[in-house]
Amino acid sequence: MFTGFSQETIDFMYSIRLNNNREWFEAHKEDYKRDFQAPMKALGLEVYDRIKAEFGDRGFVHKLSRIYKDARRVRDGNLYRDHLWFSVERPPMGEEESSGVLTFWFDIGPEEWSYGLGYYAAKAATMDKLRKYIDAQPKKLEKLIDQLAKQSEFVLEGPEYARQKTAPTPKTQTWYNKKSFSLIHIGDVNDALFKPEFADRLVNGYKFLMPFYDYISAAEK
């Protein structure tokens, strides 16, 4: 059960940024496990279990990032991440890369945290399918866009094509022109992270985003 992050969580993230070497990390490994890994794991599992209980037919799995960087990607000499994330997503299919899977995520770093729904890097073919689906089902997306406009938790982000692609309706134009996208909330590090109720915010946020997940998943088929 998630009981909240702590000031020690935040302190550790700053410390690993300033002391990103094996000697320091090994000397503070127990701090990492207790103050950072344990609450992150507890939060991810609680959120996943609650989402799975209500939306189990989606086939979601839970993933938690490691603090150790992939050796192939250590270009700046830093061996460890100063942030962690978890995801709730369907498993990749075939040779599909996880970066191209539509994902619910939560990420926490020293200065800010974020959560939402989207792709790390959507493939062009995936977004082509979405555009074809928008062509066929623009009214469904317009209803979702209206719901998004009525709240302040999430905003649509993502790179766009320089040459505008023509959407079937004006309201769907921004979505239609995306190369990739995320529906994201970015928050400051504050006392809200230190309370068990923070898990409720993530669960409620994912529930709000589930109709978007279903619409986009239908487009991927």
Image (tube, rainbow, N blue to C red):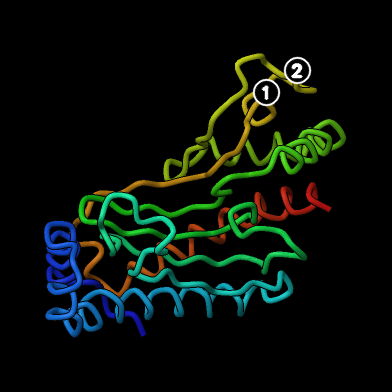
Q: Decide: is 65 above or below 148.
A: below
Q: Residue furthest top?
A: 163
Q: Earlier in the sequence, mark 1 or mark 2?
A: 2
**Are the residues tagged 1 and 2 within 8 Å (C-beta)?**
yes
Give the residue drawn at x 33%, y 80%.
2
Query: In screen coordinates, is 169 left or right of 144?
Result: right
The disc labelled 2 sits on which kind of residue?
Answer: Thr
**Nearer to the camera, 166 or 29:** 29
The disc labelled 1 sits on which kind of residue?
Answer: Gln
Q: Residues within 10 Å of mark 2 (few under 14, many from 20)?
A: some
Name the residue beneath numbered marker 2. 166
State the image coordinates of residue 105 (x, y, percent, origin top left): 48, 59
Q: Decide: is 144 above or below 74.
A: above
The disc at residue 10 is: none
Q: Residue furthest right?
A: 136
The image quadrant that residue 58 belongs to is: bottom right
Q: Residues within 10 Å of mark 1 (few under 14, many from 20)?
A: some
SS at circle 2: loop
State the image coordinates of residue 162 (x, y, percent, origin top left): 60, 16
**Nearer to the camera, 96 or 5:** 96
Q: Decide: is 150 above or below 166.
A: below
Name the residue beneath numbered marker 1. 173
Query: In screen coordinates, is 127 left or right of 10?
Result: right
Query: In screen coordinates, is 176 left or right of 4?
Result: right
Give the residue drawn at x 54%, y 49%.
120
Give the residue drawn at x 66%, y 54%.
213
SS at circle 1: helix
Gap between marks 1 and 2 measured at Cα: 7 Å
Query: In screen coordinates, is 29 left or right of 169?
Result: left
State the image coordinates of residue 146 (x, y, percent, origin top left): 61, 35
